Image: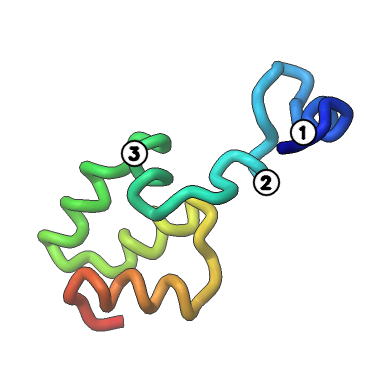
Amino acid sequence: MKDFAKLLNDIDINGSICMAEKYNGMTVNERLYLSGLMDKFDEFVRTENVDGLKEILEKIEITDETAVRSIIEGVGLSY
């Protein structure tokens, strides 16, 4: 668990957790749910919109190309 001083450093002026910590330790599904992008992600899977999926993954802070490729191929689409 973070110590109190570290937690204070992660809170911005408006009282919210900084983006670098927002999704730390979460699964893809947890990130999609928290961000409100789960339905849009599912829509892009149904319509095979790979570019849209990449944009969503970037929004939920998944930017590693290997991870992005694995997720897209994992839902049955070609990278």
**On the image, numbered disc 2 is attached to which residue?**
20
Report crowding for label 1: few under 14, some 14 to 19, many 20 or more residues within 10 A (C-alpha). some
> Which quarter of the image is occupied by the N terminus?
top right
Tell me the CA gap for discs 1 and 3: 22 Å
Numbered tag placed on residue 10 in the rendering: 1
- Residue displayed at 66% across by 30% down: 17
Q: Residue at x 49, y 57 (%)?
A: 58
Q: Which residue is mark 3?
A: 33
Q: Residues within 10 Å of mark 2 (few under 14, many from 20)?
A: few
Where 47 sits versus 10, above or below?
below
Q: Nearer the viewer, residue 25 or 40?
A: 25
Identity, as a three-letter code, of the amino acid under mark 1: Asp
Q: Earlier in the sequence, mark 2 or mark 3?
A: 2
- Mark 3 crowd level (few <14, some 14–19, many ≥20, 10 Å Cα): few
> Could you tell whether 70 is left or right of 59 in the image?
left
Outermost residue toward the left in this view: 46
Going by the image, does 64 lie left or right of 12? left
Q: Is residue 61 above or below residue 50?
A: above
Mark toward the start of the polypeptide (1 vs 2) = 1
Image spot of residue 34 (x, y percent): 40, 35
In what element is the residue under mark 3? Answer: helix
Q: Is residue 50 above or below residue 78?
A: above
